[in-house]
Image (tube, rainbow, N blue to C red):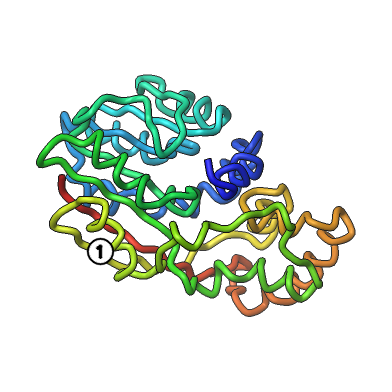
């Protein structure tokens, strides 16, 4: 594993429940479009890679697909098993998954490429386990990101917090532009054909305290940044966050946070 992969394992260790309570709702937004892109319907043999809390698995089961799922975090595996009791859910880490060649009609990965140190090798692995004529579909967060996605980072910066030294980034030789063009090129270079990409933009509506609960609990890299100086740093960032929230507050008291993601699909 790369330094980034090791960093990701540390970030997510034991945080499945906190993720389910906070950021899982945001990440579930593209699920219908993701499944449409992969052609998932009745009888489709589908693998949900990086299944998290199980939103993709549950939706695919609802479409009548024959679903299996895999995640690197044991807590996420258990969460998906609870959410979809009939699905075969396993523990597995990219870029080597515990499935034979050509096993699936469709393989989907919802916001998984954001969490791997070798993105091209990951797509190659998804292609390996997809049958000829099958489809691979993925989502990632766009860079530059939406204003809502940047909110907590702005608060942390205003509070003087800095990225922890152990929090690694993807090695330059493995990274790619997080744009439609960059994602499309990655899919093509990994051997997929008929690659199509699109931009997904939406406002995530959530209470200010609920949105803060994710990073305050240490969820994701932004949570590690917020907690990098202990309770005092968290409190300082929260004060800045409360001020910045006014930019996104609606009359009903919720925040409307603009997010931008990318969706790509390719055929084997």
* Place of residue 112 in the rendered image (x, y in percent of width and height, measured from the top left): 43, 48
Q: Nearer the viewer, residue 21 or 135?
A: 135
**150 lies left or right of 217:** left
**129 lies left or right of 73:** left
Q: What element carries label 1?
A: strand
- Which residue lies at the image location 74% right of the left edge and 58% below the top edge? 164
> Residue 185 lies in what quarter of the image?
bottom left
Residue 182 vs 81, above or below: the answer is: below
The residue under label 1 is 197
Residue 44 vs 134, above or below: the answer is: above
Q: Nearer the viewer, residue 94 or 75?
A: 94
* Place of residue 115 in the rendered image (x, y in percent of width and height, measured from the top left): 50, 49
**106 lies left or right of 210:** left
* Place of residue 66 in the rendered image (x, y in percent of width and height, measured from the top left): 24, 27
Q: Which of 105 and 239 is in front in this view?
A: 105
- The mark tally for this picture is 1
> Residue 44 lies in what quarter of the image?
top left
**3 lies left or right of 52:** right
- Which residue lies at the image location 18% right of the left edge and 38% below the top edge? 41
* Place of residue 49 in the rendered image (x, y in percent of width and height, measured from the top left): 38, 38
> Residue 227 lies in what quarter of the image?
bottom right
């Amino acid at each position: 594993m790369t330094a980034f992969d090791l960093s990701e394992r540390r970030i997510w260790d034991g945080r499945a429940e906190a993720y389910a309570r906070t950021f899982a709702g945001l990440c579930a937004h593209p699920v219908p479009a993701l499944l449409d892109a992969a052609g998932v319907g009745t009888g489709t043999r589908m693998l949900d890679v990086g299944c998290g809390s199980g939103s993709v698995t549950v939706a695919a089961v609802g479409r009548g697909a024959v679903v299996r799922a895999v995640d690197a975090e044991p807590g996420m595996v258990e969460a998906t098993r609870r959410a979809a009791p009939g699905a075969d859910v396993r523990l597995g880490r990219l870029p080597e998954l515990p499935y034979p060649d050509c096993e699936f009609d469709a393989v989907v990965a919802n916001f998984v490429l954001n969490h791997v140190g070798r993105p091209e090798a990951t797509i190659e692995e998804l292609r390996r386990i997809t049958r000829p004529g099958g489809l691979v579909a993925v989502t990632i967060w766009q860079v530059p990101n939406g204003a809502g996605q940047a909110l907590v980072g702005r608060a942390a910066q205003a509070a003087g917090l800095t990225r922890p030294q152990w929090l690694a980034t993807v090695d330059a030789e493995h990274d790619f532009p997080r744009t439609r063009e960059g994602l499309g090129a990655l899919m093509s270079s990994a051997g997929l054909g008929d690659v199509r990409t699109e931009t997904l933009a939406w406002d995530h509506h959530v209470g200010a305290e609920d949105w803060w609960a994710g990073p305050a609990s240490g969820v994701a890299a932004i949570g590690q940044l917020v907690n990098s100086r202990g309770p005092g740093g968290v409190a300082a960032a929260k004060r800045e966050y409360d001020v910045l929230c006014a930019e996104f507050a609606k009359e009903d008291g919720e925040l409307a946070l603009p997010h931008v993601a990318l969706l790509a699909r390719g055929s084997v």
